[in-house]
Image (tube, rainbow, N blue to C red):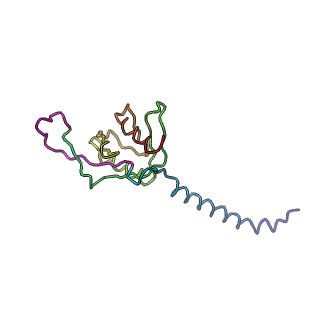
C-alpha cells in the first residue's frame, strides 16, 4: 500500500528534477538545434546596403550599385530549418532567434528600398523590400527571381 507521507515528501524533489531537466533540454536544443553547412565555415548568406555608383561608359544596362564587402548588415552562419518547396527547386529558410530579430529590424529599416543578398562571391541578388519580415522565414525560388540562391542553398546543405 502507498504511504501518503512518502508521496508528499518526494513530490517537491520530483518537481524540481523535472523543471531542471526541462531547462537543460531547452538550453541544449537552443544551442545545438541550428543547421550549419558541412562544407565550410563560410557564411550562408550576407546582406548589404547598396551603394550607388556612376554608370560606366559602354555599360548603361548594367546595375549602378555596388556594396562594401567589409560592412555586412547581417551575416547568417546557421539556420533553424531548411524547408524544400513543392517544386523541389526552391527553399525556405527559418532563421534562428538572433538572426530573426536582426532580419526583422533590417527589413523594417529598408522597407521600400533595395537590399543586396550575397550567397557566394559570384552569387548576388538585389531585391526591393516591400514589407517587414517578422516571422524569420525567407523564401528563395524562381518565382521570386532567387532560384540561383535556392540552388546554392540546396547544394550547401546537401539536399
Counting from the top left corner in percent of width and height, residue 89 is at 44, 33
Q: Horizontal placement of 140 versus 111: left or right? A: right
Q: Horizontal placement of 27 versus 43: left or right? A: right
The count of marks equals 0
Q: Is residue 60 magenta?
A: yes
Counting from the top left corner in percent of width and height, residue 106 is at 33, 49
Q: Nearer the viewer, residue 3 or 29?
A: 29
The vertical placement of 127 against 31, above or below, is above
- Place residue 26 in its image quadrant: bottom right
Magenta residue span = 44-62
Residue drawn 38% across the image and 51% down it: 43
The secondary structure that dominates the magenta segment is loop
The N terminus sits in image quarter: bottom right
Q: Nearer the viewer, residue 94 or 118?
A: 118
The vertical placement of 142 against 33, above or below, is above
Counting from the top left corner in percent of width and height, residue 35 is at 48, 50
Q: Does the magenta stretch include residue 98?
A: no
Q: Which of 133 and 4 is in front in this view?
A: 133
Residue drawn 37% across the image and 40% down it: 149
Give the farthest residue toward the front.
39
Amino acid at each position: 500500500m502507498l504511504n501518503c507521507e512518502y508521496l508528499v515528501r518526494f513530490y517537491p524533489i520530483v518537481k524540481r528534477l523535472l523543471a531542471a531537466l526541462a531547462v537543460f533540454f531547452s538550453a541544449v536544443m537552443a544551442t545545438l538545434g541550428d543547421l550549419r553547412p558541412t562544407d565550410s565555415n563560410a557564411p550562408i548568406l550576407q546582406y548589404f546596403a547598396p551603394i550607388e555608383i556612376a554608370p560606366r561608359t559602354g555599360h548603361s544596362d548594367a546595375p549602378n550599385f555596388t556594396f562594401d564587402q567589409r560592412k555586412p548588415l547581417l551575416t547568417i552562419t546557421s539556420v533553424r530549418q531548411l524547408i524544400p518547396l513543392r517544386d523541389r527547386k526552391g527553399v525556405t529558410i527559418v532563421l534562428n532567434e538572433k538572426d530573426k530579430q536582426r532580419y526583422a529590424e533590417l527589413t523594417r529599416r529598408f522597407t521600400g528600398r533595395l537590399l543586396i543578398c550575397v550567397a557566394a562571391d559570384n552569387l548576388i541578388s538585389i531585391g526591393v523590400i516591400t514589407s517587414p519580415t517578422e516571422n524569420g522565414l525567407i523564401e528563395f525560388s524562381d518565382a521570386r527571381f532567387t532560384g540561383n540562391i535556392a540552388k546554392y542553398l540546396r547544394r550547401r546543405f546537401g539536399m
